[in-house]
């Protein structure tokens, strides 16, 4: 009976040792993230790092294929189409018109949506060997030309566009950050990349952006998935 305190103390020591090991193995930040680094986009420097967390689910974009009739019908109060022409009503009374060009300077505009979060019409612009997005301010009618669909932060202070084009090189391979100013957005910076391309975006919160992309593997035309996080101050 006199040995029981010693035995209990020994078992308690083993239990604490095992618990600490479990926490270090499964919950240490070093097992998920790489070292913090900086990334300059425009005139701003952002902290960012590589992540091994592959569980993030990214929103699948619903974009028009060859016709935007259904998309226009969903917003028929403000958007109309007549053959090759798209018309957008703005709050200041302006009517913005985009016209397809099926000649040598091939350009086709397909309406995607009215984005309530940023108060912009979103249009997919297709050209012969490239594509981008035209964003039209619903209040003023002023357009923005973006490299991809805008992914808006939860507080709507930013939206970010990203595109991966590591092979053909017809489109921008990089990331754009737009910052809110008054009732519009302005381009805060564009950063292009050579060794990796950002493909999908998701905001974790107001200040953390998760990026899924492709990185060159070292072999010709072969790429590996990569995950990164950018932190906004």
Image (cartoon, rainbow, N blue to C red):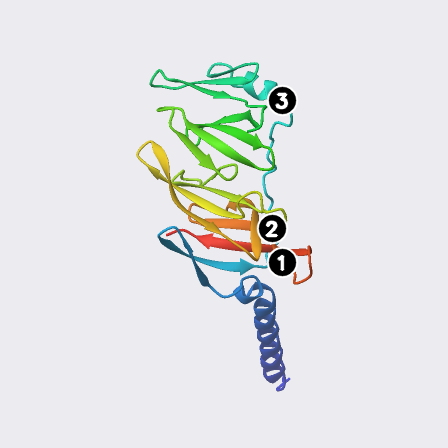
View extreme (bottom): residue:
2
Q: How many marks?
A: 3
Q: Secondary structure at mark 2?
A: loop
View extreme (front): residue:
104
Q: Secondary structure at mark 1?
A: strand
Residue 103 picture quarter: top right
Q: Nearer the viewer, residue 49 or 154?
A: 49
Q: In the figure, 13 relative to 175: above or below? A: below
Residue 162 position, x and y percent, is 52, 44
Q: Residues within 10 Å of mark 3 (few under 14, many from 20)?
A: few
Q: Residue at x 30, y 34 (%)?
A: 182
Q: Nearer the viewer, residue 123 or 205?
A: 123
Q: CA gap, disc 3 to disc 1?
A: 35 Å
Q: What residue does disc 1 label? A: 216
Q: What residue does disc 2 label? A: 166
Q: Residues within 10 Å of mark 1 (few under 14, many from 20)?
A: some
The answer to whether the residue labelled 1 contacts the one labelled 2, judged by CB atoms less than 8 Å apart, is yes
Q: Residue at x 61, y 81 (%)?
A: 10
Whether residue 204 is visible? no
Q: Secondary structure at mark 3?
A: loop
Q: CA gap, disc 3 to disc 2?
A: 28 Å
Image-based side of 152 in relation to 1, left or right: left
Residue 60 position, x and y percent, is 61, 37
Q: What residue does disc 3 label? A: 67
Mark 3, mark 2: which one is toward the viewer?
A: 2
Mark before the other along the chain sequence, 3 or 2: 3
Residue 227 position, x and y percent, is 57, 54
Q: Residue at x 54, y 56 (%)?
A: 194
Q: Nearer the viewer, residue 17 or 35?
A: 35
Q: In the figure, 66 relative to 210: above or below? A: above
Residue 120 position, x and y percent, is 43, 28
Q: In the figure, 92 relative to 184: above or below? A: above
């Amino acid at each position: 009976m006199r040995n029981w305190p010693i035995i209990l103390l020994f078992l308690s020591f083993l239990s604490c040792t095992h618990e600490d090991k479990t926490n270090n193995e499964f919950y240490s930040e070093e097992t998920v993230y790489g070292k913090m680094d900086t990334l300059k986009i425009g005139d701003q420097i952002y902290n960012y790092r590589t992540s091994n967390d592959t569980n993030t689910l990214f929103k699948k974009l619903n974009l028009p294929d060859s016709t935007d009739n259904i998309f226009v019908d969903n917003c028929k109060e403000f958007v109309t189409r007549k053959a090759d022409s798209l018309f957008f009503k703005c709050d200041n009374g302006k009517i913005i018109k985009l016209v397809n060009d099926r000649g040598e300077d091939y350009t086709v505009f397909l309406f995607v949506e009215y984005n309530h979060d940023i108060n912009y019409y979103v249009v997919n612009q297709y050209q012969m060997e490239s594509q981008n997005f035209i964003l039209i301010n619903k209040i003023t009618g002023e357009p923005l030309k973006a490299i991809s669909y805008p992914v808006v932060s939860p507080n709507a202070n930013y939206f970010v566009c990203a595109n991966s084009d590591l092979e053909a090189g017809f489109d921008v391979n990089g990331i754009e950050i737009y910052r809110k100013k008054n009732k519009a957005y302005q381009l805060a910076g564009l950063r292009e990349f050579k060794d990796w391309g950002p493909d999908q975006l998701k905001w974790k919160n107001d200040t953390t952006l998760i990026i899924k992309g492709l990185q060159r593997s070292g072999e010709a035309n072969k790429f590996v998935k990569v995950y990164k996080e950018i932190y906004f101050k």
